[in-house]
Amino acid sequence: MNRLSLIIVFALAATTTFAQDFEVPQNPTLRTNEDYVAQEPNILAAIDWLMKTPPGDQKDKRQDVDAFLLKWMTGTKAISMGIDSKILTFMESSPDLLTIFMAGWTKYALETKEGDNQVTGNIHGLGAVIDYYIKFKQSTAKDKHVEKYVKMKADGTLSKFIEKNVRH
């Protein structure tokens, strides 16, 4: 194995270890805008952990991560997320994917500081759902609604669908 390959392998292993080692902050103070901003690195780490952890693994920790993300999302000024039933057609059949959707939107918003754009937020939220669904297809129940979005993404029609159906 050449030196570059070895470095890449170690870097990937370190990334995976970091994501698995994420610990949910216990009782974080979330009162002021500064409190929410201070938690942004933890939010991004929580999202990375969530996106790398199979749906059936570490159920207790997953609940803690979900609760932490939801608490932060409901109070932060960094995002203004619109949940639209025309877009989130999988909420009844795969309710666990709602957190993945919100995580994808949140990660995009924090990385770009564009938390109010409903179209791009939905695009990135659905993109996270699609990526997660494909990555863990073996351990996720088949969902016809998500399958439709997978096909739309492959066909290049997902963005147009969202632009047409999202509330502006």
Image: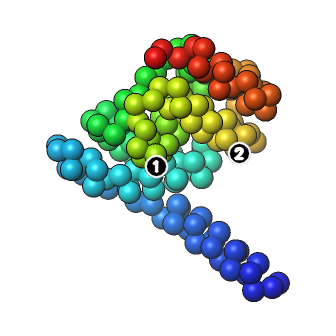
User: Which quadrant of the view contains residue 86?
Assistant: top right
List x then y, in percent, for residue 75: 27, 36
Q: Residues within 10 Å of mark 1 (few under 14, many from 20)?
A: few
Does residue 46 lie above or below 146 as drawn? below
Q: To which residue does mark 1 refer?
A: 111
Q: How many marks?
A: 2
- Tag 2's secondary structure? helix
Q: Residue at x 46, y 17 (%)?
A: 168
Pick the residue in front: 96 or 38: 38
Does residue 69 appear left or right of residue 38 in this picture? right
Pick the residue in front: 44 or 53: 44
Judge whether residue 57 can be spotted in this image: no
Q: Nearer the viewer, mark 1 or mark 2?
A: 1
- Tag 1's secondary structure? helix
C-alpha separation, residue under disc 1 versus residue under disc 2: 22 Å
**Quadrant including the N terminus:** bottom right
Does residue 119 lie above or below 111 as drawn? above
Q: Residue at x 58, y 72 (%)?
A: 14
Pick the residue in front: 6 or 91: 6
Q: Residue at x 80, y 28 (%)?
A: 155
Q: Earlier in the sequence, mark 1 or mark 2?
A: 1
Judge whether residue 43 can be spotted in this image: yes
As drawn, the label of residue 63 is none
Q: To which residue does mark 2 refer?
A: 135
List x then y, in percent, for residue 113: 40, 44
